[in-house]
Amino acid sequence: MSVFVTGGTGFLGKNLVRELVRRGERVRMLARDPARARDVAGTAVEVVPGDLVDTDAVRRGLDGCDRVFHAASLVKEWVRDPSIFDRVNVDAFGRLLDAARAAGVKRVVYTSSFMAIGRTDRLPTGVADETVEHEADHFHNAYERTKAEALRVASRAAASGLPIVVTVPGVIYGPGEITEGNIVVRMLRDLLRHRLPGIPGDGSRQWSFAYVDDVVRGHLLAMEKGRTGERYVLGGENVTMNRFFEVIGEVTGRKPLRRHLPFGFMKAVATIEEGRARLGLGYPMLTRGFVEIQKHDWAYDSSKAVRDLGYTMTPLREGLRRTYEWMQTFR
């Protein structure tokens, strides 16, 4: 039997597909652009043309597959029509689960997001695990809101008997295509080119940085060992942004970034940028939602995945060193 993968051309998805192929799995991918999909693993994968909102394409992809990795989602800071987040991240996800149930798949591993759990400075410990639910009325953008709703869709599917396991990665980073899902490489690139203006706020907010190879293995472990209906945080070290840039300085041998950008200034720039985008003058370089996100902690506890799945976490310094060395190959 084959394994069906959505999101296989994304940052995480590419690495997942390549590892599945390396392990000798028969892989079928859903992709809008078959040529781009072939770039992932060549003829070793079967490509089904289409996207998540194409129900017929999803059904074709599921035919003959006994396992599903659903890694696709709309990851954007800003779009002109926010309802597309609902259509892709919630509605299409629900239809995929219905189709998976009808196809009789043995297991679905769904890639959620740390943002689906929510900011963690609201908690006494400042760190969240899988038991924490997102605040019902505190969303910073449509992506965060729809990923939180998708978690509820997954929970309802599990309660109805669908064999689904949920993974909740932190900020995924590492070698790979520079996309909106690979923000660390984007920051590294801009920093090395002297185009990163500064650290948001005072730099004291914590984030969970998860190395991409760890997250891929975590997904495979979730498929193998995860319990139906359970969530597993696949995070990494929780560090402040100040410490993050200190480590980058240690790894690159460059002077650490120490300039800080006041949130008020960032918010003003974001307002102008969004206005420009609404006029059809390109994509905003900064959004108000992004600025608001930077005001909070996003720190998570991966103990459950370590204990139950055997998940391991690469130290941030080592992960950034590997990423920086990889970046030198194409500079």
Image: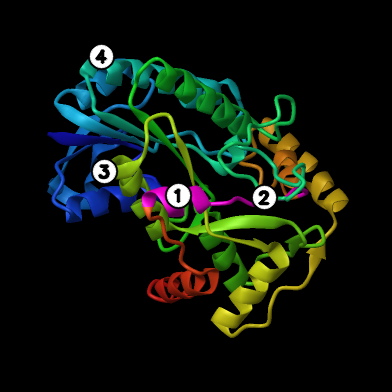
Per the image, label 3 sits on a secondary structure element best described as helix
| Residue marked by disc 1 | 305
Q: CA distance from mark 4 to mark 3?
A: 26 Å
* Highlighted magenta segment, given as a residue range: 295-309
- Residue type at numbered disc 2: Val
Mark 2 → mark 3, Cα distance in angstroms: 37 Å
- In this figure, which residue is indicated by the disc labeled 3? 37
- Mark 2 and 3 residues: CB-CB less than 8 Å, in contact? no
Q: Residue at x 69, y 57 (%)?
A: 206
Earlier sequence position, callout 2 versus callout 3:
3
Residue 102's disc is 4
Callout 4: SS: helix
Indicate left or right for 31 with 156 as reference. Answer: left
User: Pointer 2: what residue?
Assistant: 127
- Figure quadrant of the C terminus: bottom left
Q: Which residue is painted at 43% across and 18% down in the image?
A: 159
Residue sitting at 39 percent across and 45 percent down?
10
